[in-house]
């Protein structure tokens, strides 16, 4: 499989993102379209602000065009915008060139189906197999004509799902656009809604996307909210499919908090039917207990927004997401949208007359630590003697009073360790034990210089 949890990612010019590989990937996409009954179909393309995006877009467009497909280009636009446009019939497939929250030196390619949802694992597997068989012959770089009307259409569609007029009048907020795809579009959305908006990192800058800004650094947003006295802050990531918030005190409001606030708002309005939400294994058990006390069932899923979306389809639920701020409201869009998330929580503040800090009060979380180790390889975790033994020992010791989750990142060469327990002392003890055991595994190749 060439796909991670969210598309194909890497360093442009190398490996999966070499020119030849990108060309072969585009040819595999052509085969996918044929299997879906859309041979010579229409493909909608967008990208974030990374400096390598235009060349990757051109290589893909060249392969698609010489294979008989047509392309339409939205330019720099959030990933969820492509999902919304596809659901309205804009094209047979969507391609977003973005590495989301990754640093500027990375890039990636995300595929979105004609109904606005992510491709299935079976579809990705077939594309991966085709990619390995294709023979690339990259075309000369293509001329790309951007249609700015596509972004305007997304913005208008987004705002139509909220009350008409200035539904955020009287709300002041700080918005961090992360120098990414949300620049321009996000400030315009909140201003049209009537909010008083201050903007950080609002200039598109592919060399600085996600660097010291956006959802990876909400502490910067928190300081600005305190300085300006705003009601809240909203930090997007590079392609604006996720958002983290800060309250009026500058304190972090993560995706778990947002799920609670949003779910209870829907419950109060009678819209959360059935009364379920989907959370990944990364969400704190305290969130699950809090929702349960309000009569809301939690469905646990593997990590990744695709798993959340699948759980919502199967259960008929409306809301689900991850602590990272990637949240799906399935009746409005098939994928997460950081701008929509920010608009929804700001609207809840205004209609309830309560502060964001008050809205998130009463949530009691289990102590939790997440650790990240840089690695060189990804052997099966169950086959690693020291690590698997440490994990089993921790599970037996914690029992029902905690949990651990050890996994590889789906987008970067990282091992992620999560430990959660009723006792902070247990979290530290077992976190240290599991991390030290991972560092002993020569097959992992843990980078000793840091994590």
Image: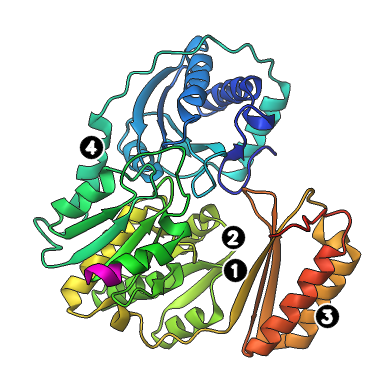
Task: Give the residue at mark 4.
Answer: 153
Q: How many marks?
A: 4
Q: CA distance from mark 3 to mark 2?
A: 23 Å
Is 313 positioned to the left or the right of 434 in the image?
left
Asked whether the residues under the numbered discs 1 and 2 touch, taking CB atoms below 8 Å apart as contact, a structural biologist would say: yes
Task: Give the residue at mark 3.
Answer: 393
Q: Is residue 267 above or below residue 167?
A: below
Which circle, 3 or 1, is nearer the viewer? 3
Q: Secondary structure at mark 2?
A: loop
Q: Quadrant of residue 248?
A: bottom left
Q: CA distance from mark 2 to mark 4?
A: 31 Å
The answer to whether any part of residue 383 appears in the image is yes
Prevailing secondary structure class for the magenta stretch in the rendered image: helix
Asked whether the residues under the numbered discs 3 and 2 touch, taking CB atoms below 8 Å apart as contact, a structural biologist would say: no
As for residue 276 lying within the magenta part, the answer is: no
Q: Quadrant of residue 82?
A: top left
Q: CA distance from mark 3 to mark 1?
A: 20 Å
Q: Which of disc 1 and disc 3 is earlier in sequence?
A: 1
Q: Which of disc 4 and disc 2 is earlier in sequence?
A: 4
User: What is the x, y in percent for residue 370?
Assistant: 62, 70
User: What is the x, y in percent for residue 238?
Assistant: 43, 46
């Amino acid at each position: 499989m060439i796909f991670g949890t969210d598309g194909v990612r890497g360093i442009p010019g190398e490996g999966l993102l070499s020119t030849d590989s990108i060309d072969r990937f585009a040819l595999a996409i052509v085969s996918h379209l044929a299997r879906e009954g859309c041979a010579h179909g229409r493909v909608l393309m967008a990208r974030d602000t990374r400096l390598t995006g235009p060349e990757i877009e051109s290589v893909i467009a060249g392969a698609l065009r010489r294979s008989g497909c047509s392309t339409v280009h939205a330019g720099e636009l959030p990933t969820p915008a492509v999902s919304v446009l596809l659901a309205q019939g804009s094209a047979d497939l969507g391609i977003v060139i973005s590495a989301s929250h990754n640093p500027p030196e990375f890039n990636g390619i995300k595929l979105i189906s004609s109904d606005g949802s992510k491709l299935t694992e079976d579809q990705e597997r077939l594309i991966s197999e085709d990619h390995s068989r294709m023979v690339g012959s990259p075309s000369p770089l293509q001329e790309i004509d951007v249609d700015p009307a596509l972004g305007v259409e997304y913005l208008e569609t987004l705002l139509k799902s909220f009350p008409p007029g200035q539904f955020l009048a009287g709300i002041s907020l700080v918005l961090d656009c992360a120098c990414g795809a949300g620049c321009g579009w996000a400030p315009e959305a909140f201003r049209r809604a009537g909010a008083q908006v201050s903007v950080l990192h609002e200039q598109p800058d592919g060399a600085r996307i996600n660097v010291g800004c956006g959802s990876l650094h909400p502490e910067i947003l928190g300081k600005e909210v305190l300085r300006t006295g705003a009601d809240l802050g909203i930090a997007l990531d590079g392609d604006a499919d996720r958002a983290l918030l800060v309250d009026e005190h500058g304190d972090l409001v993560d995706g778990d908090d947002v799920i609670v606030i949003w779910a209870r708002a829907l419950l109060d309005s009678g819209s959360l039917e059935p009364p379920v939400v989907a959370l990944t294994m990364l969400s704190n058990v305290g969130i699950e207990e809090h929702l349960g006390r309000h009569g809301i069932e939690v469905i646990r899923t593997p990590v990744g927004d695709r798993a959340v979306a699948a759980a919502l389809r199967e259960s008929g639920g409306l809301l689900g997401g991850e602590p990272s701020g990637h949240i799906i409201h399935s009746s409005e869009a098939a994928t997460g949208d950081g701008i929509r998330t920010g608009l929804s929580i700001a609207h809840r503040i205004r209609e309830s007359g309560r502060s964001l800090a008050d809205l998130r009060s009463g949530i009691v979380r289990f102590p939790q630590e997440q650790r990240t180790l840089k690695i060189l390889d990804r052997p099966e975790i169950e086959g690693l003697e020291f690590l698997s033994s440490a994990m089993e020992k921790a599970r037996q010791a914690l029992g029902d009073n905690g949990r651990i989750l050890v996994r590889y990142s789906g987008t970067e060469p990282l091992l992620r360790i999560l430990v959660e327990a009723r006792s902070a002392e247990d979290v530290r003890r077992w976190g240290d034990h599991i991390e030290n055991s991972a560092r002993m595994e020569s097959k992992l190749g843990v980078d000793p210089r840091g994590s």
